[in-house]
Amino acid sequence: MIRIHDLTKSFDDVCAVNHVSLEIEDGIMFGLLGTNGAGKTTLLRMLCGIIEADFGEIRLDGEGDFLSPSCKEKVFYLPDDPYYFPNASIQVMADFFAKQYPDMDAESVSYMAESLNLDMLQPIRTFSKGMKRQAFLILALCSRTKYLFCDEVFDGLDPIATEIMKNLFRQEMKARDFTIIVASHKLGDLEDICGNIAILHKGGVVTAGDFRKQAGNARKFQCVFPLEAKLDALKECPQIVRFHEDARFVTLITRGDTGEIQTLIEEQNPIFVGEVPLNLEEMFITEMEGAGYDIRKVLS
Amino acid sequence: MTSEKYFLKWVKEAGRGHIVAFLSWGTLAGYALMTMVRLGLSTESCFFCIGSQEQLWIFAGLGAALSFLEFFYLMQPKKLDFYYGLPVRKGTIFWGRYVHGLLHFVAPLVLVMTACGLFEANLDVDFLPYSSSYTGHSILIFTAVFLVFYHMGILFLSVCGNVLPAILGYALCLNYGHILIENVFVTWAETNYHTYYRIPLLETLDIVLSPLFLAEHLTGQNLFDKLAVFEHVPSALYAISALIWILFPFLLFSMVQKKRKTERVGRMFAVPLAERAAFGLLSFLAGVWSGSLFTELSGFSQNPMAEGAASALVGVMAAVTVHCLLEWGAGNAGGKSWGKILRRKWQLALECAAVVLTGLVFFVGASSFDAFLPEVGEVEEIGVSIAGLDMNYAGYMRALGKGEQYETERQLDKYVLKEEGKDAAFAWILSVVSENGAIEGGADEGASRITRVTVRYRMKDGREVYRQYSIDEEDLQSFAFVYDTAEYKNIAYLAGRSRRVSDARFTWSDGVTDTALKLTDEEKEALLDAYEKDVESMGMEELRTSPPIGFVEVTSEVPYYSNQMVVYPFFAKTCGLLKEYGAEPGKGLPDYSVRSISVVSVEGKGVGRKDSKHYEKPDEIEAWIEDAVLKEFDLQPLLFPLDYSREMKIEIRDETTNSTIYVDGYAAVWASAHEK
């Protein structure tokens, strides 16, 4: 379990991570979502000891000295543009990582590289961006660390490779006690694999948790009203989180008691009323706007 | 895994790519081969380690190169993220690389030095007794030199966040001390102190504060004698200075590597405190350097107080400008943050205050410096050099030149007075200082000043204090009080004279031809005695009456026993004996068969228009030759000045050998009166 308490980091006058506190349970895939400059990478770099926090505490499995080699053996950090030795092949990098991580499964590296049509002996510098990312994801998974911290993990991968990698993550998480923290600025990357997500904005955590659970009392309605319908009262109803009007077609997202809203809708004699499920993005938006944030600023 | 194994793993990891190994082993192996070839040709002037300039540059260069190769990762953000994300402490990577670099220097060094030592021991019998000590000293000294440059490199790579400031900082650190001493302190001393000649403390500081100069002194670059090189052991001061240059950066980077902020990589400095220190040192240097430059250009002649204030103002302005430029360069300004340029107001104030205070120390200390006169009891010996006395005209001109030291130093080393000469010299200096206002007048000021006297007091506590005074004709005349002491004349005329005359050859030279004197041991002794008596009875004022008429050359197979005795016409006893022994001491240029004389007239002191005339007619030759003095006899340009604007080339027909001899001369001063 990773426990982050009141973590703060400033670069001169810019507060990159601002009093962040999070608890990340074992065996989950945790998403860090935010725009560029939100503090995702800084948080990940602090978690693996590359940079030191100005203030606050990080505990990995309860250990205070998370910078000790024994503790860091549990962590693999995969930055968005990973370093490799000049002219190094996957084989060379695997040999190197095998010296660093005692549980490294070198055989699996070959197997997975073969599955993804990656040549173990070809210099990594000759790989395309996507191939490089696949190669490092393989190395990261085969290092068999308890924690994997990935920055913009699926960036540069084609849809098929993205799916393959997501499946590999899922399999690994099923097979062993494996926790992944993924930082991304794309909601779509995390939508189908991350249950828990923290949204960062200007260094602070806007909200965090399992949004499917949190958005449980939110509902989405799609309605078609006649031209003479007066919707002002409906717009100003406090339970409505989002109100989108396109001529006679109106989409509403509500939270809390929807009885009053349903009454207001019926009063306007709608031509059509239907409830549809919320996607993850809408759950975020609901959650965020419910928390008083202007989501367009956060995810612009 | 044990911590030792873990550390060794990272020492081994530091060797990935093998660039350091190739560079170090390759360079030293190449050097060893080249040195062995050179030693095979000659062991007299070729040294494989101490005394070798090439070796010094190679080792200093290797120190810098290995430090940059090993620790360049500190400048690479991607590589840092990679390494620091691994299960290893930052310190393990750092020290692993430190040890790796050191091992790849020490191992080839020991091998190469041992091989060269064995090789030379087989070739050179002189080297054999020194083989182990020279090789051992060489390994120790050059390891120290390497460590100085290696540690400096590591320090700059640790504190800087970008390779360019690291390289510039390294280059500046090599020269900072030298610039500060030579271009600031010495300049201010020269301009503020009228009696300044040298300050040994500044010279020592110049060496110990400049790693390259220090390395040169450690490795015996100033030695030319083979045995001196073999026996060379650096002085304790230089050894301690080297130790400080090794340990101080070591302690600093040991602390810095723990505090270094990864996120500052790419900026000028990775450690904020280093940024502060560097900006302070650079601003201070810029301030004092500009101030001293202004002082030098303005000359400090008319109104010292006003010019001192102006110099301080220029220095402060330069310090402020450089401070602001550095803040701007460090990214602390621009856009909306121009105000940040002055964010360290107190530091800037301190820098300016330091600039002003440093200048003030030289300005205020001038009067006490110039008024310095030690107590007689404190002085062990006094060295005296008067520009133009006992030196030729060329030497006189050099001695009067700015910054020249060779001629003066030669005389200061020669005319060292310890006994009655010291007391006489002390009394004379006192009169020069107190009576004729040499201090107030400045070194080159006043029409009455004819030359300069340089004095070196060697104190009983080992210190050396130098002063230089300008003197007038009256002072020069009163110097006879010193010149006429037996101690001074002994040094001037009899120093190096050997009584081991049996194997010495005596030759009379009148400047045109040489005559070998066939003398018995008794005759040689008699001639030396006569010369000694003549010197004893001569007075300085007599030197104004005539130039020398010749030399008695005493040559001996025994080293250091050769000598040249100057003979003046008033050395009656010597001249008498020379005549008796077959020499012709009275024979001068008019007595030779002169065929032609070329006279080159120069307008101005050596830089003006030249006018050459050739004379072949007997009456013209006769008119010129009467007044000609051979250049060889120009030994007293102050007491017996010649007409240095007329240089002669005299063609002489030697009837005895049927050959033509060319000699150079000057016209005597009186010759300028009658233009031919």
Image: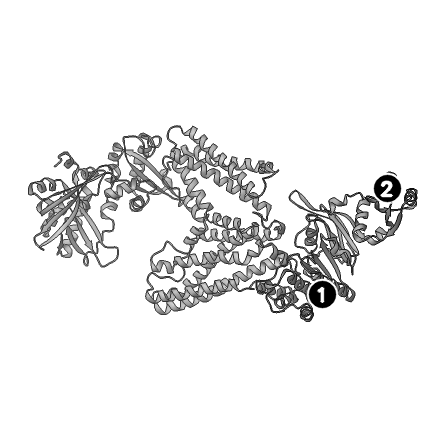
Q: How far apart are the alpha carbons under marks 2 and 1?
A: 62 Å
Residue A249, how many percent across, how many down?
83, 46
Q: For label 2, count other residues whose C-alpha is less than 10 Å away and answer few (under 14), some (14-19) or many (20+).
A: few
Q: Chain of mark 1?
A: A
Please indicate, yes or no, whether residue B640 appears anywhere in the rendered image.
Answer: no
Q: With B246 as the anchor, is B528 left or right in this view?
A: left
Q: Residue furthest front?
A: A227
Residue highlighted by disc 2? A227
Image quarter for residue B476? top left
Query: Looking at the picture, which amino acid does disc 1 mark?
Result: Arg
Residue B324, how many percent across, how many down?
54, 38
Rendered view: B371 above or below B621: above
Residue A284, how many percent across, how many down?
79, 50
Query: Looking at the picture, which amino acid does disc 2 mark?
Result: Leu
Please indicate, yes or no, whether residue B118 appears anywhere in the rendered image.
Answer: yes
Check disc 1 and report its element: helix, strand or loop. Answer: loop
Residue nearest the viewer, comparing A53 with A153: A153
Residue highlighted by disc 1? A144
* Residue drawn at x 23%, y 43% as measured from the top left: B392
Residue nearest the viewer, comparing B449 with B593: B593
Rendered view: B254 above or below A124: above
Contact flag, marks 2 and 1 (Cβ < 8 Å): no
Earlier in the chain: of badge 2 and badge 1, it is 1
Q: Nearer the viewer, mark 2 or mark 1?
A: 2
